[in-house]
Image: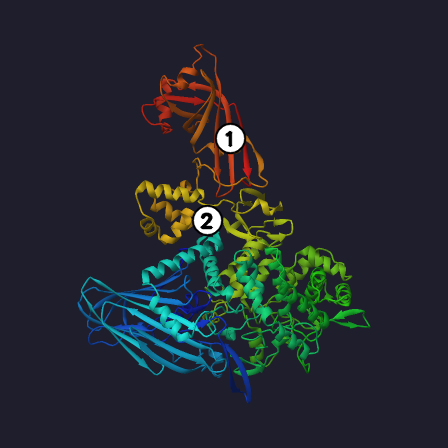
Amino acid sequence: MTPWILAYEGFDPDGERLREALCTLGNGRFATRGATPDGLRRTPGTYAAGVYNRLTSPVAGKTVTNEDLVNLPDWLPLTFATPGCDYFHPEDSDLLEYHHALDMHAGVLTRDLRWRDPQGRITRVRQRRVVSMADSALAALETTFTAENWSGPLRVLSAVDGDVRNDGVARYRDLRGDHLTGHATGVEDDLGWLTVTTRGSGVTVALAARVDAPAKQELTAEPARVTSCHVLDLVEGETAAVTKVVALLTSRDPAIHDPRSAAVRRARLAPRFDELLARHTTAWDRLWDRARMDVTEPEIAQAIHLHVFHVLQTMSPHTADLDAGVPARGLHGEAYRGHVFWDELFVLPWLNLRFPDVSRGALRYRWRRLDEARAAARAEGYDGAMFPWQSGSDGREETQTLHLNPESGRWLPDASHLQRHVGLAIAYNVWQYHLVTGSMPDWCAELFIEIARFFASLAVLDPASGRYEIRGVMGPDEYQTGYPDAGSPGLDNNAYTNVMTVWLLLRALEIAPSVPAVGSREPARWADITRRMRVDFHDGVISQFTGYADLPELDWERHRGVRRLDRALEAEGDDVNRYKAAKQADTLMLFYLLSGDELLGILDRLGYPADPGLIRRTVAYYLERTSHGSTLSALVHAWVLASTDRATSWNLLVEALMSDIKDVQGGTTEEGIHLGAMAGTLDLLQRCYLGLEVRDDGLRLDPLLPDRLGTLSLPILVRGTRFEIEARDGMVRVNGETAGRGTGRTFTFDQGGTIMAGTGDLGRRIAHHRERLGLTREQVAERAKVSAGYLEYLEETPASPTSETIHRLAEALGTTADDLLGGGRERPPGRGPAAASPSLEKLDREECLRLIAPGGIGRVAFNGSHGPTVLPVNYKLHQGAIIFRTSYGGAMDRDLRTGMEGVEIVVGFEIDQIDEAQREGWSVLVQGPFHHVPEEEVAEVIGADVTPWAGGERLLYIRIIPQQITGRRIHGL
């Protein structure tokens, strides 16, 4: 198990679709599934953020219209053939070796294979694939061939294929998928190009390909395909390479004349593969510097890295300037038709703390569709803005009216558009962005207030009870769509919707004074709703909706292990609406978004005073009645159980981390990863387990780390200030300050951040060792498997590389990770400005001894013959005493001899360490008698391996017996 590599051994045709999804490469602007370039059974897919198209299809006697994220032309095809043999396909070839590996740190997909043709010729093939994170228009595929036991011609056929459609999801195949039309191809000098246009939305997409090879190229433009053929002259034991570099542009892109000419120019100007790869890996290095989440356990680390990797491939800094939302299944497949649901509720809180500009871009996607949401609200008779459950290109409701149950084969009415709570998710994200950045732009306030107006108008006062009610909606649990045998779908007083509406209106009351468009009457009604909203209870727990208590229990023993109960029961002629059964957390989402104090405070404000046991009872009640038919389910339950049942919380977190890798939902991951669950697990680690909360007065931490998590290390960015957090052994350190388990602590914003400008300590140490060895940056980068650009970045910028990168650099430089990080060594002189509010921590004797135990550089202070004297020495701690070497007849030998038996001279011995990169330091002062080590004991102390400070013949061993030890640690340098 390698934490940064997702590896597959052997070719498994039945598992290819899952591997394709998990090995997708992207840059936030477009992504390409990890399909083989040469397979017969493959599901290729290239998807550009925001490129949608609508088609109308006849289904079950009705005409339905669906909008899809469009599958764009396939740029991957590349195959090869030995003399007299057919072109290679892994499904029908004699494979001697076959390996796939996704390097998540570098963003590179590698395939290695050895293939024996029917005539016994063995060829080794190695492919490296990237979708550039440095230049968001480029992708590349490098293929190298080595003839192991033969020489001769090898035909290589490469193509860009426009004859593609959306057919990656089996249950959608009764619907039209022919989104592309107007195919055109051509050849321009040594480049081939292809353009297509989406049928309805009219988006033009252009791809241009340049193939670099040591042989003459034959380019052919066919009606929907452009091909390139080379014949390589292979020599036994030698390697030849063919590289395809592709540029993808669309008519939605800025700063272009037209997509075709732009794609041709970008492909022509693109660097060769090695330089393109170097720029790409440097870009990923910089992303990981901000996004890293290091843990100790390799399997957990691998899953975390995979989740970060796919979140950033979907929502990267390139996405920030696009008009694109957060697609629930990433840019990794066609499930959910590429639509934007409420998954941003789980994605943006993680991005806020690392890439706030990307979060801002996702919120602007919603704001740009505010007028459409207003129109939707007016059409239903409401105020404000009603956002759709499923959104695509323009913000209209894209939820299907019919959906297929693959277990019964029946097309069924779909009422999920009644999940009005998607607006609550948008508002929650606006508020979280405000807390983390300290910013509430006018457009964010407008978005928030318009959502508040909608939910306020959704609440209707019942004169009989004196309570406001919200009727005819669905909650997050997608099983419960309506009352049994009711004539229309929808439920009344969904607890999640009602309580979160109160939360929303309370926040709107805070914002309203700064929004001129809010009149004097609106806030009064909002405040009234926050005191009189209806919430139902039964059996000592919060009821999911009015009437829930009257539903019978499901026979869970009969349906144990069935995750999609809605499909199973419908196939049996039954209806999940009849039972107390949930697909995923609904009421429990309240405990995911709100703290216990917040929730109990809202209930108390509504006139429902509750004891703290309500939360525990409600969690236990619904957990027993949930089938976990969504990847979000394990995540949310892991969160709400974190403080009460840590063992179960950990098990559910592991399930959530493994849900896509192991495809726990049975065939859904191959249709696209679950972006909300991936980002949500990361957010659970940082916000839930660390107890991380951003407040106006600073960063609050109240950690509840599972014992089995090991060490968790991560950086976050709050209001422009960087905090380095490390959690282990029941304690958390933030920029050098410690907060133990169960001891909540608020860190002010001036206690965080990397204030230094210029090179950090780590960078100086790397440069020192590189120059000591006489190595160039390129040589060290090659040894450490990082890019030269990233090495330059580390040497010249305060940075926080991953622990694995530190160890690789240490090995490349012939030193240790501890040495690079400054362990046991004196740091170079500081260059940073004084801190705003440093703090001192007193150290006890035991901690002082622990700090000085490794040895290093210290200073001896004494009254010499010429006055106060301080001399540096190399020392070791040996049997509790300080040992160092000096020369006979030197200053310490002369000035510290009393000439009187039994008379001792007490000296001071000081050791300190300062690390500007970590913005902390410590100092220890040892006071005690100074002795020459007797000759009969010298042999013993020689084993301490003390080296003299200045070299030379320094054979006098000195011992200081500590009598008094004091120390201080300084934080916030």
x then y, percent, for residue 301:
46, 55
For label 1, the SS is: strand
Q: Residues within 10 Å of mark 1 (few under 14, many from 20)?
A: many
Residue at the spot of label 2? 799
The C terminus - image quarter: top right
Residue sitting nearer the eye, 665 or 452:
452
Decide if residue 281 is on the left or right side of residue 543.
left
Q: Determine if residue 405 is in view.
A: no
Residue sitting nearer the eye, 371 or 392:
371
x then y, percent, for residue 464:
82, 72
Q: Which mark is residue 5?
A: none
What is the number of callouts on the image?
2
Give the residue drawn at x 36%, y 27%. Answer: 948
Residue at the spot of label 1? 924
Residue sitting nearer the eye, 5 or 266:
266
Work out whether 169 lies above or below 354: below
Kind of residue at badge 2: Ala
x then y, percent, for residue 158:
30, 73
Q: Earlier in the sequence, mark 2 or mark 1?
A: 2
